[in-house]
Image (cartoon, helix red, strand yellow):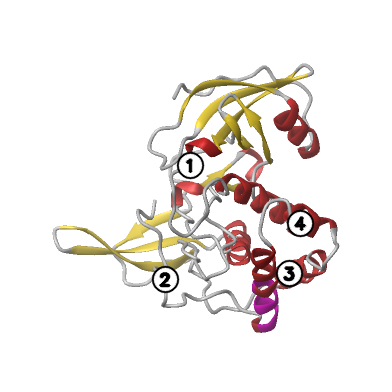
């Protein structure tokens, strides 16, 4: 994949304008993102004098999964964006479903992730200490070779904590470290939401550091508003009905209700591997 070129800066687009650009712009395939299990194409998109880079995942390039119907991963990516927007947290880049050079697929704004400068800590780390240090949350012990283990930790970061709540809501089955994109301005995005919204519990994530802890007051408020937006006939439900099955929407409502009832961050169920592989 070619390195992203810097497009000459124009006026700052709103998220709504970015969605229009993605949905109506002309897609030009520039390369392929290697290492992905499904076809992921790196593209430019241009519309009415505006231009950006994006990721295009055609449904035709989806690898069959035993537990998800063919052609739905792109729809789930768009549904994840819709729910993220409903929370007000803006944790998923603008994402649309559209036709492209290889048929219908998901089109998502390209996010150029920032890397930590100097001694600035990242979001994930391995430590040989038995307990996480200040500002870190423990995930699990991991083998690091030669019979040694290390403790996998993630930052005790409010942005990650919001993402942990969103993942529990959308039932994300694949929250890897590589799906966390720190962006300019202090924003954090999560990407790759194809395996979400299953009716069975599929939650697999690296963000278990708050498991069993009380939800923040902010999260409780967001879940309350989200529950209202998931009432039958609400605009969010109308949009999700174009992307998910009625059973999946019912399961979404049930997950939100369960989080509100317990007031706690999700814990691993024990019936499904809790951490995705590879974790990063």
Q: Picture quarter containing residue 261?
A: bottom right
> What is the secondary structure assignment of the residue under circle 1?
loop
Magenta stretch contains residue 38: no
Query: Cα distance, mark 2 to mark 1?
Result: 23 Å
Q: Position of residue 175 (x, y in %)?
A: 49, 56
Q: Position of residue 150 (x, y in %)?
A: 28, 63
Q: Which residues are magenta?
A: 255-261
Q: Residues within 10 Å of mark 2 (few under 14, many from 20)?
A: few
Q: Which label lies toward us, 1 or 4?
A: 1
Disc 4 target residue: 86
Disc 3 target residue: 223
Q: Main secondary structure of the magenta part?
A: helix
Q: Picture quarter containing residue 147?
A: bottom left
Residue occupying the point 57% across, 78% down? 213
Say which mark, if any, is on residue 272.
Answer: 2
Compare marks 4 and 2 and give the one earlier in the sequence. Answer: 4
Compare marks 2 and 1 and give the one earlier in the sequence. Answer: 1
Query: Cα distance, mark 3 to mark 4?
Result: 10 Å
Residue 70 falls left or right of residue 159 = left
> What is the secondary structure assignment of the residue under circle 3?
helix
Q: Nearer the viewer, residue 248 or 107?
A: 248
Query: Cα distance, mark 1 to mark 3?
Result: 32 Å
């Amino acid at each position: 994949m070619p390195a992203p070129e810097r497009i000459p800066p124009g006026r700052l687009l709103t998220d709504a304008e970015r969605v229009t650009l993605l949905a109506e712009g002309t897609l030009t395939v520039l390369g392929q993102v290697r290492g992905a299990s499904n076809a992921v194409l790196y593209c430019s998109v241009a519309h009415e004098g505006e231009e950006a880079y994006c990721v295009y995942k055609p449904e035709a390039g989806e690898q069959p999964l035993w537990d998800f119907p063919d052609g739905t991963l792109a729809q789930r990516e768009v549904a994840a964006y819709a729910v993220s927007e409903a929370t007000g947290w803006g944790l998923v880049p603008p994402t649309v479903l559209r036709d492209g050079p290889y048929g219908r697929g998901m089109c998502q704004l390209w996010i150029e992730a920032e890397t930590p400068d100097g001694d600035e800590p990242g979001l994930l780390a391995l430590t040989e200490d038995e307990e996480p240090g200040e500002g870190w949350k423990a995930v699990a012990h991991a083998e690091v070779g030669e019979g040694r283990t290390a403790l996998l930790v993630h930052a005790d970061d409010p942005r990650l904590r919001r993402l942990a709540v969103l993942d529990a809501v959308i039932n994300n089955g694949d929250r890897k470290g590589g799906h966390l994109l720190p962006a300019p301005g202090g924003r954090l995005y999560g990407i790759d939401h194809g395996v979400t919204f299953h009716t069975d519990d599929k939650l697999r994530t690296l963000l278990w550091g708050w498991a069993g802890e009380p939800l923040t007051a902010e999260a409780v408020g967001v879940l309350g508003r989200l529950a209202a937006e998931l009432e039958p006939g609400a605009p969010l439900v109308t949009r999700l009905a174009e992307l998910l099955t009625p059973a999946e929407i019912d399961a979404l409502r049930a997950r939100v209700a369960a989080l509100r009832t317990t007031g706690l961050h999700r814990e691993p169920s024990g019936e499904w591997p809790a951490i995705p592989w590879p974790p990063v």
